[in-house]
Image (tube, rainbow, N blue to C red):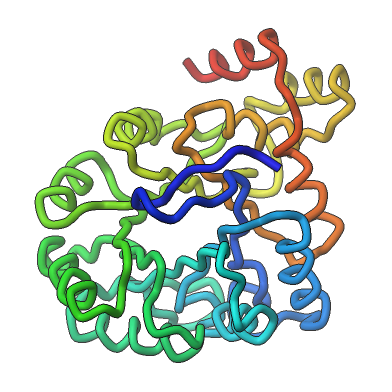
């Protein structure tokens, strides 16, 4: 298993996490087709040394959080379960921001109940709401942190200005943006997170089911190292910065094992240089 990073300075986790979005039905809506397999995935993740699980109240909605609690509660002391609030669902594949303080308070209370905890380790604002001042949404999370409902606050789907605003309101333990070897738009955010000692959680760390510009170099490197394309892509994320914690998700035990094994894959200097320069 990979080395560790302490989220918020006091929650050390292995740097290969698990994203629990796929423990749901099509369109991230409703229960999964194979519920038993999803429960096995969660148990197997812990057996493989995963100590960080990322979910959200909107996954299902509510389904992912409920499955995590059913499978793993009472949680091992070393396990950190992060969740998110600030998106609501109107149907399969439909997502809508709601950053109103009253909604966030209701969402956090719901997550506390479903996860069966008294305090959420890491609560991330899922997305800035264009109809609500960002400071107002964050202020609601700060109030709940002061009340003991939240241990650390993170932000998701943000740009540099959002991050600056967040840091002016509260300490920020994590940033979760779309980022992978193909999609490098958050490169400046990753660099800033490293400087600020903030965990960076790349969502969609394996892209959207296929690779475009990275396909050829990933294939070449994978063949030379005896690995899969996805393992090389995850290993590159671990190489990218010590604050990066990939959170690949799956509802398959076999795919989980493949992903976690990437934590032990050593990229040689040639592979690192090729992938570093890919979209430079």
Residue 256 occupies which quadrant of the picture?
bottom right
| 243 w.r.t. 117: above or below | above
Q: Is residue 97 left or right of residue 221?
A: left
| 261 w.r.t. 100: above or below | above
Residue 1 position in % (x across, y down): 71, 42
In percent of the image, x 59 and y 67: which residue is there? Answer: 21
Q: Is residue 219 left or right of residue 30?
A: right
Residue 46 position in % (x across, y down): 71, 63
Residue 81 position in % (x across, y down): 51, 68
| 207 w.r.t. 37: above or below | above
Residue 101 occupies which quadrant of the picture?
bottom left
Q: Is residue 174 visible?
A: no
In percent of the image, x 53 and y 71: which residue is there? Answer: 93
In percent of the image, x 55 and y 80: which residue is there? Answer: 65
> Looking at the image, which is closer to me, 212 or 60?
60
> Looking at the image, which is closer to me, 91 or 229?
229
Residue 236 position in % (x across, y down): 62, 28
């Amino acid at each position: 298993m990979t080395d560790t990073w302490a989220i918020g300075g006091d929650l050390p986790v292995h740097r290969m996490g698990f994203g629990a979005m796929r423990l749901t039905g099509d369109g991230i809506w409703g229960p999964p087709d194979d519920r038993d397999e999803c429960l096995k995935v969660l148990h197997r993740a812990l057996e493989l040394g995963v100590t960080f699980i990322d979910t959200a109240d909107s996954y299902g909605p509510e389904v992912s959080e409920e499955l995590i609690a059913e499978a793993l509660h009472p949680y091992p002391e070393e396990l950190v379960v992060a969740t998110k609030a600030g998106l609501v669902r109107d149907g399969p594949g439909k997502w809508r921001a709601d950053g109103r303080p009253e909604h966030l308070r209701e969402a956090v209370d719901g997550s506390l109940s479903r996860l069966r905890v008294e305090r959420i380790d890491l609560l991330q604002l899922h997305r800035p709401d264009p109809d609500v001042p960002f400071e107002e949404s964050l202020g609601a999370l700060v109030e709940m942190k002061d009340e003991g409902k939240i241990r650390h606050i993170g932000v998701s789907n943000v740009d540099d200005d959002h991050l600056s605003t967040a840091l002016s309101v509260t300490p920020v333990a994590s940033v979760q943006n779309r980022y992978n070897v193909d999609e490098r738009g958050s490169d400046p955010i990753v660099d800033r997170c490293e400087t600020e000692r903030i965990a960076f959680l790349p969502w969609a760390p394996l892209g959207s089911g296929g690779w475009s510009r990275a396909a050829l170099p990933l294939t070449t490197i994978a063949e030379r190292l005896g690995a899969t394309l996805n393992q090389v892509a995850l290993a590159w994320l671990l190489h990218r910065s010590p604050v990066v914690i990939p959170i690949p998700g799956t509802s398959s035990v076999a795919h989980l094992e493949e992903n976690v094994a990437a934590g032990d894959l050593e990229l040689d200097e040639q592979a690192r240089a090729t992938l570093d320069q890919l979209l430079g």
